[in-house]
Amino acid sequence: MKRINEYKKLFNIEKEIDLKILKKSYRNLVKEWHPDKFQDGDPQKEEAEVKSRQIIDGYHFLVSIAPETKTSNLEEYTITTSQSNILDYHHKGMLLEISFLDGTTYEYFGVPKTVYIKMINSDKLYRFAKRNIFNSYLYRKSKKTLQEA
């Protein structure tokens, strides 16, 4: 959640993410912090390179959790969480990353350690996750690792 709030602050988004507003803010920030605006040797050039990477990462991250993105990917998410079993999972801080047998990985934000412990101690891991995690926490698709041949 800290990461989400930092990126929202960077793009001046206070409530729900609107892709049009996000895109406009992204374009303005890229124009302002593009490294090519600065001369070689200028101390601000290095800062601009770091800031531009942060802007790009933040933009892609916020797009991936935007309600419009979630709505357009809901069918795929529903198929994955209802038909593919859990392959692997990792919990760090308040972030739970679950990899599925179909090769898709989702990140769930704000998952407390207590819920994670209940999940790993459950005799039916998938059923617990389906009931308590999949539709209870903010999520985003983080990567698709397995490719079809």
Image (tube, grey):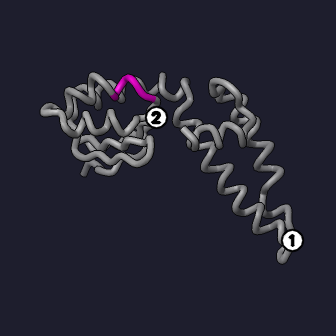
Nearer to us in this view, 149 or 51: 51
Nearer the observer, disc 1 or disc 2? 2
Residue denoted by label 2: 110
Question: Is residue 47 rendered magenta in the image?
Answer: no
Residue 37 located left or right of residue 147: right
Q: Quadrant of residue 21?
A: top right
Up-down relation of residue 130 to residue 8 (above or below): above
Residue 139 located left or right of residue 81: right
Up-down relation of residue 143 to residue 79 (above or below): below
Q: What range of the chain is rendered magenta?
A: 133-137
Rendering coords of residue 122 (x, y %): 18, 33
Q: Which mark is residue 39?
A: 1
Residue 58 located left or right of residue 73: right
Q: Quadrant of residue 5?
A: top right
Up-down relation of residue 114 to residue 37 (above or below): above
Name the residue type under label 2: Gly
Nearer to us in this view, 15 or 37: 15
Rendering coords of residue 114 (x, y %): 33, 35
Rendering coords of residue 39 (x, y %): 87, 71
Q: Secondary structure at mark 2?
A: loop
Q: CA distance from mark 1 to mark 2?
A: 42 Å
Write the residue at 54% across / 24% down: 67
Magenta: main secondary structure = loop
Q: Are marks 1 and 2 in contact (CB under 8 Å)?
A: no
Q: How would you rate the neighbour count of disc 1 (Cα within 10 Å): few for under 14, some for 14-19, many for 20 or more?
A: few
Q: Secondary structure at mark 1?
A: loop
Count the numbered circles shown. Answer: 2
Q: How would you rate the neighbour count of disc 2 (Cα within 10 Å): few for under 14, some for 14-19, many for 20 or more?
A: some
Write the residue at 38% across / 41% down: 96
Name the residue type under label 1: Gln
Up-down relation of residue 80 to residue 34 (above or below): above
Write the residue at 58% across / 36% down: 63
